[in-house]
Amino acid sequence: AYPHLSVPLEDNYEVDIPLQGLECSYERLLNLLRRESQITTNVDNNPICHDTRKTALMDDILIIDGKSIVATMEVLRKAHNIPAAMHLLGLSTRGLNHNRKLRTKLAQEETNQQSTLFLRLEDDDDKNELRRVYKAVLSLLGHNANQQRGGSGSDSNSSPRLIMHLLRHHMPNIAQIPPGSEMYHAAMNALGKFGECGLILDMLEEMEHSHELNLQPAAEAETTTTLTRHHAHVPPVDRMAYQSAISSLARHGHCREATQLLYRMQAKGFEQPDMNIYNELLIGIAKEA
């Protein structure tokens, strides 16, 4: 249905292998994510009439079908096939960037404001579809925690590193999509399954700092340009971020840190967590006892 998402036959040996028995290193997964695109555009710069060029550009627009890609990610999750998931994410991202370039060309040649607005809305739709894909990938990486814990050396922590790479680099810089709060919550849940207490706390501190920067007057914000740039893609902390962090820590044996977060959340004036969070914290404390 979507040829731009197909895997060339010569690449099958790299992606058609599940995690078990495979040396699934961080570098190897990044290479699959960075694989060069085979997507090409049929439109050149030859002088042709506006309508013909516009039709040709529109015909080259790819369909970013988040629902189908997420369903495929679910199959790959059950097969523990992280390499194939990374390859599919890379292809999906390149499809988005391909569409963005074509729409930029169309917008430059379009004089109708309504048509330009429509192009922007289409780009927003593609971004929303890809957000669903990123969230599915984070979930996939978290669900494979049990398989990777049996690994050794750097291979056993490739997924946590990959989660942080997707959140801090790939999504904002390659796909040019701000991660948003929902993505940070999903990353915390995934990291919790690896027992990555430190990374969860680091993410929460980044969100807290982003929240503080948003509260600063414009004049003060200009004096912290470097910090502002660093936190440009970090969403401000919210009640759900604290809940996700507390839940992840409590479920995976870090109840002391989870309890401290509960007090920190209250001290910063956020609404109390819901009853489920208290229950998870109490269950975690009982297990530790």
Image (spheres, helix red, strand yellow):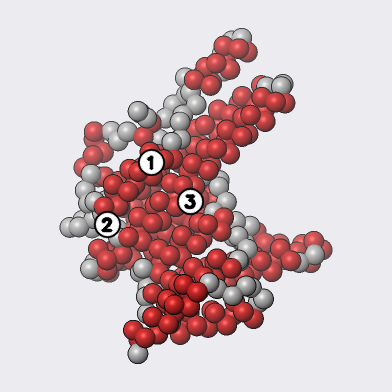
Q: Is residue 233 left or right of residue 191?
A: right
Q: Amino acid at mark 1?
A: Ile
Q: Residue at x 46, y 29 (%)?
A: 62
- The answer to the question of whether label 3 and label 2 lie on touching residues, with beta carbons closer than 8 A, is no
Q: Is residue 196 left or right of residue 275?
A: left
Q: Is residue 283 left or right of residue 224?
A: left
Q: Amino acid at mark 2?
A: Cys
What element does badge 3 sit on?
helix
Where in the figure is residue 178, as x and y percent of width and height? 57, 51
Which residue extends farthest left?
Answer: 21
Which image quarter is the N terminus in?
A: top left
Q: Amino acid at mark 3?
A: His
Where in the figure is residue 7, as x and y percent of width and height? 30, 35
Q: Residue at x 70, y 26 (%)?
A: 114
Give the residue number, with chain letter if any, for mark 2. Answer: 24
- The answer to the question of whether label 3 and label 1 lie on touching residues, with beta carbons closer than 8 A, is no
The CA distance from mark 2 to mark 1 is: 22 Å
Where in the figure is residue 187, as x and y percent of width and height? 45, 61
The CA distance from mark 3 to mark 1 is: 18 Å
Give the residue number, with chain letter if any, for mark 1. Answer: 69
What element does badge 2 sit on?
loop
Camera-side residue of 237 and 35: 237
Camera-side residue of 286 and 25: 286
Residue 193 visible? The answer is yes
Where in the figure is residue 2, as x and y percent of width and height? 37, 30
Which image quarter is the C terminus in?
A: bottom left
Of badges 2 and 1, nearer the viewer stands: 1
The CA distance from mark 3 to mark 2 is: 19 Å
Give the residue number, with chain letter if any, for mark 3. Answer: 170
